[in-house]
Image (tube, grey):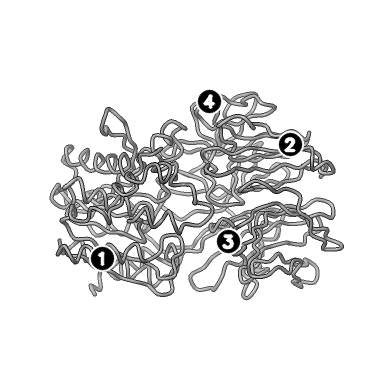
Amino acid sequence: MNTSIETAAKKAFCKLIHQREIKVWQGHCHWIESNPDVKGDYLVVLKPDGEKETLVDGDDALGNHVHEYGGGDYAIYANGDIYFIRQEDQQICRYHRQTKVIDPITTGDQHTRYADIDLADDVLIAIQEVHHEHDIVNRIISINLDTLEEVVVAEGHDFYASPRFSKDGKLWAYLYWDHPNMPWNQCQLCYGHWFEKDAMQTINASNSDVISQFCWTSQNQLLYTSDQTGWANVYLDGKPLYPAQMHFGFERWQQGQQNIAVMDNDVCIAIAGPPEKRSLGKIVDHEWQPFDLPCCDYLPFMATEGDDLFVMGAYIDAPPKILRINVVSGEWSMIEGNKVNHDQDSVVPAKPIQFPSLDGAQAHAFFYDARKTHSSALLPLLVLCHGGPTAATSPQWDPMIQFWVSQGISVVDVNYRGSTGYGRAYQDALEHQWGVIDVEDCVAARDYLVDARMVDPKRCFIRGKSSGGLTTLRALMYSGKFAAGGCYYGVSDLMQLLKITHKFEQCYLDYLIGGYPEEEKRYIDRSPTHEIGKIKVPIIFFHGLLDKVVPPSQTIMMIDALEAHHVPCEYHAFPSEKHGFKDLENKITALVKECLFYKGK
């Protein structure tokens, strides 16, 4: 193994501590951390005096698997007690602030999961997911905190999210959607009086617009985002607060996330896009007033108390940091940040580019030019295909991208059509076109940079993870413009995926490919395993053997078929990994092997 490359890979996967889910109680700022050196996600608190303390960890580590992607792992009660979902058994537990004792408050079996807790008076509400032998049922339950009696309060829809009480506890609301929709295709907001749970009203019951999030104001009004105009704007009483071609929503892959918040004085705080121009600000008198912050993006986690807003800001040249912002004065300070030893002066920043694709379409990407730190000669290019595919990439600092640049390989990170943040039309361009227009846009990004004489046309590579793996494989099949490719736990057989995918994504392929069995031929035609003979260049594969989202059999089929066609390939299996590698050493090993693979071509 090349020691210099291994050293650079270790630097790329430096021991970053990741934070998520900020909440504040009486000046105490809480969040969940994950650390490569610590088993399980743990809950910490930063006290008003600056002391940081771990509250919940070890065998009580937090995490849930609702919808398989989890999120929404804890909530804080008025008295400071914390209710959280324990990773080990997926049950709700209570951390007593005064005694530091942890007690379970649900006693479900291994087939029952919980997520996205909210609290009011003596009642807890949460999403419950029950896995029966032949069915999975999602619903909302309430728990009396005195008796621990559990009651189903909403059921009948395929999916639920964000059950939330109003500030006075008299009203409540939640989001729901049904197959064949995904939450970014159609998502309804339902609300009503807590004591009249059978008389709920739905804001957008007959519309195909998406309400991705909401908040209660102090006046018991619902503030929410809707993309009914083609852009996810913020609405109050059915009217937009700031109508603009700006994106205030987000793709709801996980629970517990939020891009909008309401201050105590009912001022709306929001994160707005597109991805290359993200800002955090407030809407006052129908005007957008962004805060002056040094961030290029923001993670979808917010908390408020008094005039203070707590957010996670992302940077071009450093890891994310937790910020406290006074929304009246605009003054801000960093209260927590990763202490990573990296040379900020050597960071190559992202350059947003817009480029032409087929049929006159325009696509977006971020270009990282390795010539800034290497010779001015034409250097290799690595095209990145993000996963999802309904997701997006941003210009925030990514040590993995900086690794490639350090190795003299420029990178273009593509937001192909279908990516979020550019309006509903751009997102919906991918409908029934997955494996086609995403491929066209990734190839077009490569052509744009080649034509501009910014990269070496003979040393272009492409890599993708999960759904980005299918994009990668099809680009290698049809473009003839890449010297090699890398595929991490990628999709290669759509027919097989259709049969084994989990409930949350059970009908996702209806949107991405088309209905089955009506479009069976399209499923076959878009599956790389069925046209393996069209791949002529080497590919390196990586897969976790515990992956249940995209099973390793997808990669094994590709390897067998490529070897039968005498196409050079490498396969690296990781027995302990699921969908998305977690182990630091495994990440380093994979990155080094992938780099050596490309440099040998």
CB within 8 Å, label 2 to label 3: no
Q: Earlier in the sequence, mark 3 or mark 1?
A: 3
Q: Is residue 411 left or right of residue 544?
A: left
Residue at mark 3:
134
Question: Which secondary structure, mark 3?
Answer: loop
Instruction: Measure the C-alpha gap from mark 3 to mark 4.
Output: 40 Å
57 relative to 379, above or below = below
**Residue lying at 66% horizontally and 26% vertically, measured from the top left:** 238
Image spot of residue 430 (x, y percent)? 39, 38
Residue at mark 2:
217
Which of the pair 270/315 is nearer the observer?
270
Q: Is residue 249 left or right of residue 454?
A: right
Residue at mark 1:
559
Instruction: Measure the C-alpha gap from mark 2 to mark 1.
Output: 55 Å
Question: Which secondary structure, mark 4?
Answer: loop
Please tell me whether mark 2 or mark 3 is closer to you in this view: 3
- Direction right: furthest residue: 146
Image spot of residue 137 (x, y percent)? 64, 55
Which of the pair 460/428 is nearer the observer?
428
Residue at mark 4:
229
Residue type at numbered disc 3:
His
Q: Earlier in the sequence, mark 3 or mark 4?
A: 3
Please tell me whether mark 4 or mark 1 is closer to you in this view: 1
Residue type at numbered disc 4:
Thr
Which of the pair 582/332 is nearer the observer?
582
Please tell me whether mark 3 or mark 1 is closer to you in this view: 3
Residue type at numbered disc 1:
Ile
Instruction: Measure the C-alpha gap from mark 3 to mark 1.
Output: 32 Å
Q: Is residue 488 left or right of residue 320?
A: left
Image spot of residue 52 (x, y percent)? 64, 65
